[in-house]
Structure formats: structure tokens, C-alpha cells
Amino acid sequence: MRTAFIFGAATLVLAACTNNPQTNKELRCAGEVLGAATVGGVLGNQVGGGTGKSIAAAAGAGAGAAIATQSADCQ
């Protein structure tokens, strides 16, 4: 989880380094998707136990990423 957070933060920082509006939009979208996947994974990890906990974390991460791709920045 820590690696995903660091990667997401680096993506957002890099978005400030470009002047191309399309690139900025893509980087914002990537940051949103990574952030939402991280939050979904953490929330999913709070459910169940054993293998079910891992499955819930993966499902939460997938759902978070799927929802984030539907945001206005990613369209």
C-alpha cells in the first residue's frame, strides 16, 4: 500500500511539471485511479479474514479504480 501511495503522489507532482493540457489530464486521471484503488483496497482489507480478506482487498481496489475511471477527469 505504501508503494501505491508514493507512486500516486509522484504522479500528482509530475502533473505540475508539464504545460500540455492533455498530459496534465492524463496524469490527474492516473493519480485519481491509483488513489481510489488504494482506498478501495484498504477498505476491502477491513472485511473478512484469511483468504477472504485478500479477495475483498483486491475487489475493493478494482472497484475503486473502476469508479475513478468514470470521473470527469478521465473521460
Image (spheres, rainbow, N blue to C red):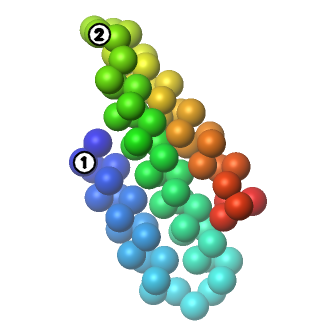
Judge whether 44 appears above or below 1 on screen. above
Q: Residue at x 53, y 33 (%)?
A: 62
Judge whether 10 appears above or below 30 on screen. below
Q: Quadrant of residue 65?
A: top right
Mark found first going from the N terminus, 2 or 1: 1
Q: Quadrant of the N terminus?
A: top left
Residue 59 at what x, y percent from top left? 50, 25
The residue indicated by pointer 1 is 2
SS state under label 1 = helix
Q: Give 43 or 53, whichever is nearer the viewer.
A: 43
Q: Give 53 or 14, whichever is nearer the viewer.
A: 53
Residue extending furthest left? 2
Instruction: Say left or right for 1 vs 30.
Output: left
Residue 22 at what x, y percent from top left? 68, 77
SS state under label 2 = loop
The residue indicated by pointer 2 is 49
Q: Quadrant of residue 20?
A: bottom right
Residue extending furthest right? 75
Judge whether 32 appears above or below 21 on screen. above
Q: Residue at x 48, y 29 (%)?
A: 60
